[in-house]
Image (cartoon, rainbow, N blue to C red):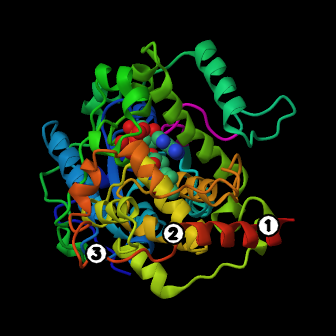
Amino acid sequence: MTFFIPKNYPTPIAMKTTINIFWFRRDLRLNDNCGLFHALNSDKKILPIFIFDEDILSKLPVDDARVSFIHQELTHIHHQLLEVHSSLSVFHGKPADILKELSEQYTIDTVFTNHDYEPYAIQRDLAIKDFLTSKQIQFKTYKDQVIFERNEIVKKDGTAYKVYTPFSKKWIEAFQFKGLQFFPSEENLEHFIKSEPHPILTLKEIGFTLSSITVKSYKVSTKLIDTYEETRNFPAQDSTSKLGTHLRFGTVSVRKMVDKASKSNNITFLKELIWREFFMQILWHFPHTAKDSFKPKYDRIIWRNNEEEFKAWCKGETGYPLVDAGMRELNQTGFMHNRVRMLVGSFLCKHLLIDWRWGEAYFAEKLHDYEQSSNIGNWQWVAGTGVDASPYFRIFNPTTQIQKFDKDLNYIKKWATDFQELTYPTPIVEHKFARERCLRVYKEAVN
Ligand code: FAD
């Protein structure tokens, strides 16, 4: 374990007084942060911390763009804190060990943080809660990254919705009834512990290097929201918000985005934000879907799992220009347009009969906006194995998709620049043959 307490920190004076801690996780901002708001309104000074979890980092490449992004956002928070004569303490290690160490250095009354709903995070937080309780330290956590969580939107009988449309209707009803409550944490920054200025851990100190790919900044203008429905399906138009990564790491408040989206006469964009919450509650209610198909009989599918074909798909060398353009956009930028994500996903599972879990894992490695619940939910949707899934006999035709969504070939020309050259690969599989093979294999498994 590399346990690292920054030099010059904590100050000896601060160590003697009782403090509270705010633990930043997927909420990397000082404004409208629910847990932070409650912490800053408590009766103790707040020590702000962030922990680079070595168990998560050890699985990532050293130039992972998401780690660079987190580091950049932590530096930004740190600079904002320096202005109020405080600073962020950044650690690298196992969260339980770091909190144990802090509890030995400080007298801590309460550790504040925001909820995290992923299976790994739930287990981690249960263990941390047990430890803190054994030390008579309170662990207070808050809903911050969604409007509605866990059991808040369920059917009348208390069970989870498995179909999006009724979920979204109930979500909108509840939203209209309850309205939005904001948490202006930014108004109380004086309540952080004062400290000597100190640098935060560098990327190098946690074993990483700066990525050459940067996360796209987001754009959520009134025009984007109003025209979203008519423009969102055309990948060459670059007309979507790029909010995913910012919602994932909490560099933007979901409440502020929902507020904007709900003020438009066209609520298509709001409905996308509801899809995100739909999949979050699905993973929370059905954590086994992280590994297993939601519909068990779909785990009887005999996948071909041809490794050479998988490699060609990953590299964007299938010979189908829209599929290849999408995969190359992903590899080069860490982003792929949703319409193309659906096509490449369907192509992998249905044309190549490769297990959705392989595609899910590849996206998890590459996507900057990777979100476990959305990634699994959408992969199971394209594979036809999940809740409210696309039926298995719906097989996107990778050629007619071009006529529908990229007829001027602008997207293809941008990402699959060689598509008209002699060296461009011939199609990896013939469409009609692949379609019939897929129908046969799926039918055998599920009937
Ligand atoms: P916009 O179109 O501007 O939408 C705004 C926001 O709404 C998104 O940022 C996202 O938070 C939410 N949203 C939109 N569509 C969906 C959806 N279908 N499911 C859940 N939330 C949605 N989205 C992720 O955030 N993380 C993932 O790991 C992810 N993996 C995907 C895998 C596959 C196979 C597919 C088909 C889709 C996946 N999506 C994922 C959903 C969607 O493609 C992205 O959210 C969207 O393309 C991100 O671009 P944007 O931020 O410009 O989105």
Magenta region = 141-150
Cβ atoms under marks 1 and 2 closer than 8 Å: no
Mark-to-mark CA distance, 3 and 2 = 23 Å
Prevailing secondary structure class for the magenta stretch in the rendered image: loop
Q: Quadrant of the C terminus?
A: bottom right
Residue linked to disc 1: 443
Q: Helix, strand or loop at disc 1?
A: helix
Question: Which is more foreground, mark 1 or mark 2?
Answer: 1
Q: Helix, strand or loop at disc 3?
A: loop
Name the image quarter holding residue 277: top right
Circle 2: residue type: Gly
For the residue pair 6 and 390, the one nearer the viewer reads as 390
Cβ atoms under marks 3 and 1 closer than 8 Å: no
Left or right? Give the position of 232 relative to 114. Answer: left
Compared with 127, 55 (above or below) is below
Residue 143 part of the magenta segment: yes
Q: Residue 390: give x, y in percent of width and height.
A: 66, 50
Residue 135 at least partly seen? yes
Residue linked to disc 3: 424
Marking on residue 359 = 2
Circle 1: residue type: Lys
Name the image quarter holding residue 250: top left
Residue drawn at x 23%, y 43% as measured from the top left? 217
Q: How many marks?
A: 3
Q: Quadrant of the N terminus?
A: bottom left
Q: Residue 81: give x, y in percent of width and height.
A: 20, 42
Residue drawn at x 50%, y 86% as measured from the top left? 307
Residue drawn at x 66%, y 69% as measured from the top left? 291
For the residue pair 158 and 7, the one nearer the viewer reads as 158
